[in-house]
Image (cartoon, coloured by chain):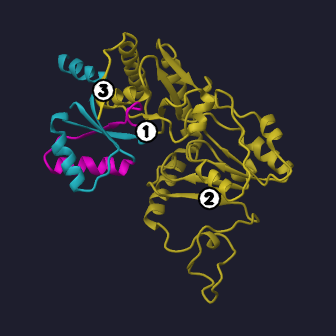
Amino acid sequence: MDGLISFFASHHAIRAETVLKRNGLAAHLIPGPKDLSPNCGVALRFEYALRENVLAVLTAKGVRIDGVHFYQPRTDEWNVRQAGR
Amino acid sequence: MRPLRHLETLGVELTVVNCNQDGMLDLNGVRRALRANTRLLVTTHGSNVVGTLTPVEAVAALARERDVLSLVDAAQTAGAIPIDVQEMGVDLLAFSGHKGLLGPTGTGGLYIREGVALTPLMRGGTGSDSAHQIQPDFLPDAFESGTLNVVGIAGLAAGVRFLLGIGIDAVAAHDRALVSRFLAGASKISGITLYGPRDAALHCGVVSFNLAGATPSEVGLILDERFGIMARTGLHCAPSAHRTLGTFPTGTVRFSFGWFNTPAEVEKAVEALGDIAAWAIQGAAASKTLSL
């Protein structure tokens, strides 16, 4: 997943994960990277290519967001490491 | 700090005494900060950021000497470090139920020494003194209006009974041994910075650290997703503590050890940190980010 949404409050982050999954959209909560999201402890990863769809769902459900980012964190290297094990 | 900062807006004057870089409180600093109009001395018992313990008996003694009330926040220590409010000599002691006391979230309590005059935050029915429309002034009814969270409190009581069966001394020794093992193992990792005292006897079960070349949230994410280890990253709702440590605004990674943790888990955590530190120091590829 190469997209990230930051939020003002954890409430909205958790709500976003719930409504996206209910709509068949992949979503995953992570500790908010400080450089992108100083406001709140958690941020949400999603598929950047699906951002229009994702944002439409969040808007329709009244989930308030802080910002949308393209995000390929270097910590994803650990997924490759894991797969190679 | 938020309630204290709020009181400040209501006209209460606040003097903040900083700890040293290890989170140790200097009693002389407290003594110097006491003013003619000081009414209350508030301290944490154990830091939620680095785990440093405050010498609360000495602080309470100083407060008594100056005719000032003392309030201890024991959120990090209740259930993990022996507490005897009378021996401590404190006037007020607040605790949360969901940490060391193993209770449900949303539970907690405030010890009020008999004789301390305090205004209730809430007033209402108490099931006592029902013929009167004035809030009772006796303990605990003065502060227990309305329907209490009985289910939560029953859960808290179960946690307390469990702990008393083990003995708080035994819990404290267990936590101290884990902290000691962690500090010994982690201090050998190249690129790690450990915050707080190196002596486990000065700690509750909380330790804080950073790895060179990685942010706390990166370390927390890898620990969680690749090693199944939970940590709390960032500022821990304590910006001034992080300013004192020199870790503001980046924060730290925090582990909290408790009765259900084992030495083997601590070893596994140290090993995981070694792996992550090596990855961070090698200079992992840069993250790609772009904000809309």
Q: Which residues are magenta?
A: A9-38
CB within 8 Å, label 2 to label 3: no
Percent from the top left, x then y, of residue A74?
Answer: 30, 21
Q: Which mark is residue B22?
A: none
Q: Is residue A31 magenta?
A: yes
A12 and B152: which is toward the camera: A12
The residue sitting at 68% across, 53% down in the picture is B8
Percent from the top left, x then y, of residue A2?
Answer: 22, 30
Colour in which chain A is shown? cyan
Query: Disc 2 marks which residue?
Result: B110
Percent from the top left, x then y, of residue B249?
Answer: 52, 31
- Which SS class for mark 1? loop
Q: Pointer 3: residues within 10 angstroms few (<14), some, or many (20+)? A: some
Label 1 resides on the chain identified as B
Distance Cα–Cα, label 1 vs label 2: 26 Å
The residue sitting at 30% across, 15% down in the picture is B285
Query: Disc 3 marks which residue?
Result: B289
The residue sitting at 55% across, 25% down in the picture is B180
Q: Earlier in the sequence, mark 3 or mark 1?
A: 1
Q: Is residue B166 magenta?
A: no
Colour in which chain B is shown? yellow
Q: Pointer 1: residues within 10 angstroms few (<14), some, or many (20+)? A: few
Which quarter of the figure is the C terminus of chain B placed in? Answer: top left
